Amino acid sequence: MLRSCSVGSSLVLPLALAACSGGPSAAEKRAADDRAVAQVEAVQKQKPPAKPIAPRPILFGDIQQYSLFGAGCAFAPGGSMGAVLLTREKVAYLKLDDRLVRFASDPGSAKFPLGTVSRYIGKEFAASLSRLGEPGEGLRFAGHLTITDPYDQIVYDADGEVQCGA
């Protein structure tokens, strides 16, 4: 919609019409707002780069200090004897730096020995443990541990050995 304006010269007509216009129409403003919202949403959905983690062995002193005794399984990467993940029926623990990260069991995941499961979910990470090779009923087997961040990006991935006991 144009405002009424008097224009004296035909050379300035295009400039005068632009100056006299009432700005963008309601539809144009809505479209611009929608584009701006879409841009903000796109930025919010971007994943930050994955930040690899380096779990540390959970030592006997940690087990004593945090009362982590009980039936469950332990995952040790590679040929190490130092377990970096302890799983129990309802919880699991991973040591990062000098703190223990706690996970809750995912009851819908695969069953492992002694009431443990293959997947545990925490506030910062999720841990997935799998059996390598032929499935069996043993309490000691080759396994694989994958830790993912809240964006489902892998931040730790290792083969190792799983030992279960009480």
Image (cartoon, helix red, strand yellow):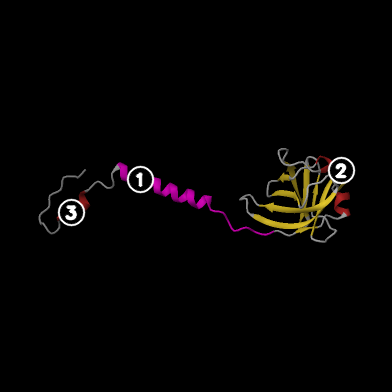
Q: Earlier in the sequence, mark 2 or mark 1?
A: 1
**Circle 1: is it few (<14), some (14-19), or many (20+) Cα within 10 Å?**
few
Quadrant for the N terminus, please. Answer: top left
Q: Position of residue 131 (x, y in %)?
A: 76, 50
Q: Distance of mark 3 from mark 2, alpha carbons?
A: 83 Å
User: Nearer the observer, disc 3 or disc 2?
Assistant: 2
Q: Which of marks 3 and 2 is nearer the N terminus?
A: 3
Q: Earlier in the sequence, mark 1 or mark 3?
A: 3
- Mark 3 = which residue? 16
Q: Hey, which residue is sitting farthest top in the picture?
A: 107
Measuring 56% from the left and 54% from the top, which residue is drawn there?
A: 47
**Kind of residue at disc 3:** Ala
- Mark 2 = which residue? 71
- Mark 1 = which residue? 31
Q: Distance of mark 2 from mark 1, alpha carbons?
A: 60 Å
User: Nearer the observer, disc 1 or disc 3?
Assistant: 1
- Tell me, yes or no, whether the two marked residues, 1 and 3, touch with CB atoms within 8 Å: no
Instruction: Give me the disc on residue 59.
Output: none
Measuring 11% from the left and 56% from the top, which residue is drawn there?
A: 10
In the image, the segment drawn in magenta is: 26-52
Q: Hey, which residue is sitting farthest front in the picture?
A: 134
Say which of 117 and 40 sits in front: 117
| Magenta stretch contains residue 32 | yes
